[in-house]
């Protein structure tokens, strides 16, 4: 089975969308901790940071 190469326009779009996903995760899970009336959750905060960084790293890998 032959592998098909992904064209650069698709890679650029995918990279941008992964960055958008990382920004959304950061806004919801990290910044949401500070504006909500609920008790601060360190587990949720740490999960948000980790997922956001993973999205940024994958976006960088896809774009290069």
Image (cartoon, helix red, strand yellow):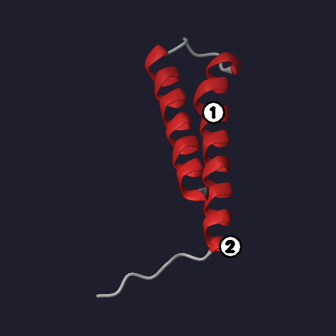
Q: Which mark is residue 2?
A: none
Q: Mark 1 to mark 2: distance in Å?
A: 26 Å
Q: Are marks 1 and 2 in contact (CB under 8 Å)?
A: no
Q: Which mark is residue 9?
A: 2
Q: In the rendering, at what x and y percent does residue 48 appear? A: 53, 30
Q: Earlier in the sequence, mark 1 or mark 2?
A: 2
Q: In the rendering, at what x and y percent does residue 45 appear? A: 52, 21
Q: Which element is circle 2 on?
A: helix
Q: In the rendering, at what x and y percent does residue 9 appear? A: 68, 73
Neighbour tally class for label 1: few under 14, some 14-19, many 20 plus, Cα within 10 Å? many
State the residue at coordinates (68%, 49%). Answer: 20
State the residue at coordinates (53%, 42%). Answer: 57
Report the residue marked by disc 1.
26
Name above or below for residue 41 compared with residue 2: above
Residue 58 located left or right of residue 35:
left
Name above or below for residue 52 compared with residue 34: below
């Amino acid at each position: 089975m032959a592998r098909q190469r992904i064209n650069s326009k698709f890679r650029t779009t995918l990279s941008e969308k992964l960055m958008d996903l990382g920004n959304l995760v950061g806004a919801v899970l990290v910044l949401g901790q500070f504006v909500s009336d609920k008790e601060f959750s360190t587990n949720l905060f740490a999960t948000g940071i980790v997922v956001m960084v993973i999205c940024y790293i994958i976006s960088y890998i896809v774009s290069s």
